[in-house]
Amino acid sequence: MPLLTLYRLVTNAATPLARPLLLLRAAQGKEDSDRLAERMGYPSQERPPGALVWLHGASVGESLSLLPLIERFISRGVEVLATSGTVGSARVLSARLPAGARHQYLPLDAPAFVARFLDHWRPDLALFAETEIWPNLVRAMHRSGAPLVLVNARISTASAERWRKPPGVARRLFGMIDLCLAQDAENAARFLELGAPRARVAGNLKFDVSPPPIDGLKLAAFQSALGTRPVFAAASIHPGETPLVLDAHVEMARVLPQLVTLVAPRQPDQAVRILQLAAERGVKAALRSQSETPPADAGIYVVDSLGELGLVFRTAGVVFMGRSLLEEGGHNPIEAAKLGCAILHGPHVEDFAEVYGELNAAKGAARVLDARGLAQASLYLLSQPARLRKMGRAAMESVAKLGGASREIMTAIEPYLAQLALERR
């Protein structure tokens, strides 16, 4: 029996288990309890009349990368459906969607859920970010006749190898994708090898995303509360990095007793653990959820809320980007660079190697190896304001030169949009 047929049979048989699974995940904070029906393909909004373009990004980063395209479609009067798969992405994306776009959760990849979703929304064109390949969904889109395009497409060598292992699966599935618009030539080549009929380079959409918005009054109040205190930030850090960041703070505080370190964990539920680790080091810590501004006696201020990196990046001149001291591939530094931050990172930035390569070459970012290196580099920059500003400008100018992917993508899909216009007439 072909593997894709077996997958379809298994996911179909498992459909009755979906609701209990979703309820369990909701209890763990991993699903939106008020919108579980969307995960089973039930719509919570009406489909707008006319042509509808569907854009999907799995989590926060992928979803936000689609914003420049969403804005371009809206400006052309095209209706937009945006989907994502995580609670965090839904909250962040919904807050930043322009008028005329609507958000839904992506249904689980069960045949009945996918069919229900597509029967209601009937997208005329679908754009999926990066490598979001769900077999039942891809097959259903292919049967519907609506073109499916991968944008900002990337796939690691390891992932490509995993796709090749099941005989015939990759060539069958990737062959159903109309076009892959890849971030670079290496990724385009990998998609062609997997069976995509067409692939070309369009660039990285994340360079086109506007910096995260912020309420000016809240920002002013926050910065006023800090006064002249030196500020360091650790953004999107993961649990294994927390002790290293706190150790770096302790070392810096010996030289800068008034230092405040803004810690933005990747998962806000890590906040209590950060408080415990800070207390073990004799450092007073506070949570943003309990105090809108850092208390005067707090050295650590934990930003335990989603969608507030704009506040962090606009306040701290020096920012350490997390997931990079661990062997996990790093996090996207583009928003910090766009806001003129001097960026520090660990040695493990494979997931964003091109971006960090450009930033490092322009001297807008620097690599550190451990807590001591992080403390020393941060102290140097905080004690040299002119050097810090120069590094921040270099970061900003570096990412500005790399924009333009949204324009390239719109050019590449223009034939699809022209065909939609003809069909609607």
Image (tube, rainbow, N blue to C red):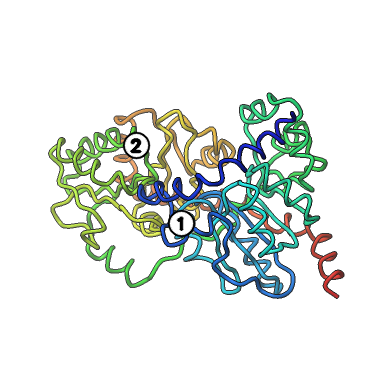
* Mark 2 or mark 1, earlier in chain: 1
Amino acid identity at mark 1: Leu
* Residue with the mark numbered 2: 377
Residue 306 spot, x, y in % from top left: 38, 56
Residue 102 appears in view = yes
Residue 421: image quadrant is bottom right
The residues tagged by marks 2 and 1 sit, at their Cα atoms, a distance apart of: 20 Å
* Residue with the mark numbered 1: 339
The quadrant the N terminus occupies is: top right
Residue 120 spot, x, y in % from top left: 66, 65
Q: Nearer the viewer, residue 414 or 169?
A: 169
Residue 78 spot, x, y in % from top left: 70, 71
Relative to 4, is 296 on the left or the right? left
Q: Residue at x 29, y 33 (%)?
A: 244
Q: Secondary structure at mark 2?
A: helix
Amino acid identity at mark 2: Ala
Q: Secondary structure at mark 1?
A: loop
Q: Residue at x 25, y 38 (%)?
A: 246
Q: Nearer the viewer, residue 172 or 336?
A: 172
Residue 63 spot, x, y in % from top left: 55, 54
Relative to 376, is 51 on the left or the right? right
Q: Residue at x 70, y 31 (%)?
A: 3
